[in-house]
Image: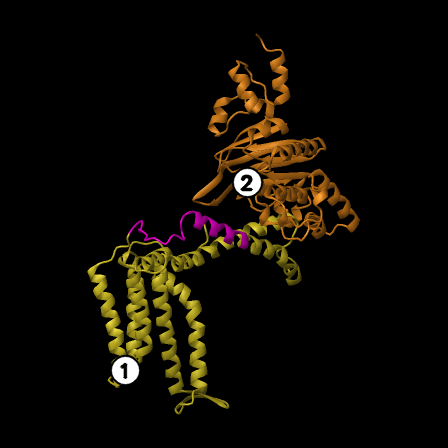
Chain colours: A orange, B yellow
Amino acid sequence: MAEIVLRSVCFDYSSAVPVFREPGITLALPQAAIALIGENGAGKTTLTKLLNGLLRPRTGSVVVAGTPVAERSVAQMAPVIGYAFQNPDDQLFERTVRDEVAFGPRVMGRPRETVQAAVDRALDLCGLAGQASTHPHDLVLAERKWVTIASALAADPPVVVLDEPTLGQDWAGRERLRALVRALGGQGRLVLVVTHDIDFVAQACDWTVVLTRGLVRYSGRTALAFADEGRMEEAGLELPAGTRLARALGADPAPVGDEAFAAWYRVRPA
Amino acid sequence: MARGLSLYAEGSSPLHRAHPLTKATLTLCAIGLAFILPSWPLVLGVGVALLSLLAAAGVLRRFLFVAAGLLVPITLLLALVQSLANPHNQTVILPLGPLAVHREGLYIGLLAALRIADLVAATFLFSFTTRPADLAEALMQRGLSPRFGYVIQSALQIIPQSLETADRIRDAQRARGLETEGPLPRRARAFIPLLLPLVLSALVATQERAMALEVRGFGLKVGRLARYRIPDSLGQRVLRWGLALAVVAALAARLRGWL
């Protein structure tokens, strides 16, 4: 079952700045770890904001986890779709990490025990269990970003959007993120990762959507997303390191992801 | 598109191209004359001159739109209060029970409103045709300390920037389930989550701005060059002095009782 369905969605910020022109975006996304990639200004963040009603389409419909977005306010969409924005400083305001993460489910009116349990789980998943009573602004940027990710998870939504989560993350943070994205995708959630980090896409996401100048150029298995080099070039994207290396070594089609590269390398023709 | 605090309207009229100091002088002198000149035909004359300048700059319609909301209530209020309660009131033109509308007060009230209209027109004439950055630049080229210039420019820039940040914060909190619309108690609850990130980010931004300025040599005690000089002309210089003299002359005439 498709978790996110967009039908003929047209959108522009003003008539001078069209983003999704006629005939509009039509897209169905499954429950999986999904990467949304494309050049700067392709419309990635705009697309994600249409999913929770922060932006409203000019024409067309958006349905997220069975909920027609047009009929709900942004706040009413929050239990359905968790959103971790790029800049954590736009949302942090509580005195402790725990209160910050609990804010979402609390304003949704969930019972205290449910909130406690959900917050503990989210803090654990995001490696913040030891920082629960720290002031969010005493954390470094990468950790503050984790607070926003935990905040998005604490409401236990079926769909999670992570906007540029790898920015500023060190290796350990990246590994944690990879595990998290994989785990969420495996739990039957849809986790949508907006990113420019193509290696992360190859490692963590099963499904990839390529957006170029407001058009969906590809939506399907990540393994096949990088097969068409022309399409990637048009989207202003490089190939994952492993894929590039395999291609240089003569692989066609080139493998995507570390395991696939290793498998190909072991049996490659001499 | 950034929402600006500035009222500047893009244009290419002679007024748009005039030196900011010329326009500043024009505005200050028009306000001075409006309050110095004693009789309504003269004050009205200043207003008509300002309106024709607004028309020449292509911003008359915009001015009328903004001014109507501002000036109509002020005029009504002044006319009402003065005509009912000015101590010089003698001639009744309309009895209203225990109160009465008086000719003297009505005249005083309308003259005061006319002066305020001149003031508003002069101020908008300046704001509509002058980029704030150009004014600060012009003042710095006339020897204003760059620190003050920066204060002027940043004050004008920080508010639109804060509005944008406030929008992002609002989006982020709504996406977490916070209702920001609806009845008052609900909106009051949304106040802290919306305000605190704004204050914190403003404080952080101030520190970063200060450091960014310092590493670019803002504090150096050396002479500066201007990237571009704002063009001035002999004609404008003469006009500025002429306007200033007119104000002085009007003031002298008023004090001598010639007007």
Name the quadrant of the C terminus of chain A.
top right
Would you call the spot at circle 2 few (<14 residues within 10 Å), some (14-19), or many (20 or more)? some
Callouts 1 and 2 on one subunit? no
Q: Quadrant of residue B43?
A: bottom left
The numbered disc on residue A45 is 2
Asked where in the image residue A82 lies, by quadrant, the reply is top right
Callout 1, which amino acid?
Arg
Q: Is residue B223 magenta?
A: yes
Q: Position of residue B205 (x, y in %)?
A: 51, 51
Q: Is residue A75 above or below residue B92?
A: above
Q: Give the residue at x 56% y 56%.
A: B199
Which residue lies most toward the bottom here?
A: B90
SS class, disc 2: helix
Q: Nearer the viewer, residue A77 or B91?
A: A77
Q: Residue at x 62, y 35 (%)?
A: A192
**Residue pushed farthest front?**
B221
> In the visual, does B91 lie left or right of A134?
left
Q: In x, y percent, where is residue A156? A: 71, 42
As drawn, the label of residue A232 is none
Q: Which residue is mark 1?
A: B254
Q: Relative to A205, does residue B131 appear above or below in the rendering?
A: below
Identify the element where label 1 is drawn. helix
Q: Can see residue A259?
A: yes
For residue B15, side relative to residue A17 (left or right): left
The foreground one among A74 and A164 is A164
Part of the protein shown in magenta: B203-228
What x and y, as percent, mark residue A181?
A: 66, 33
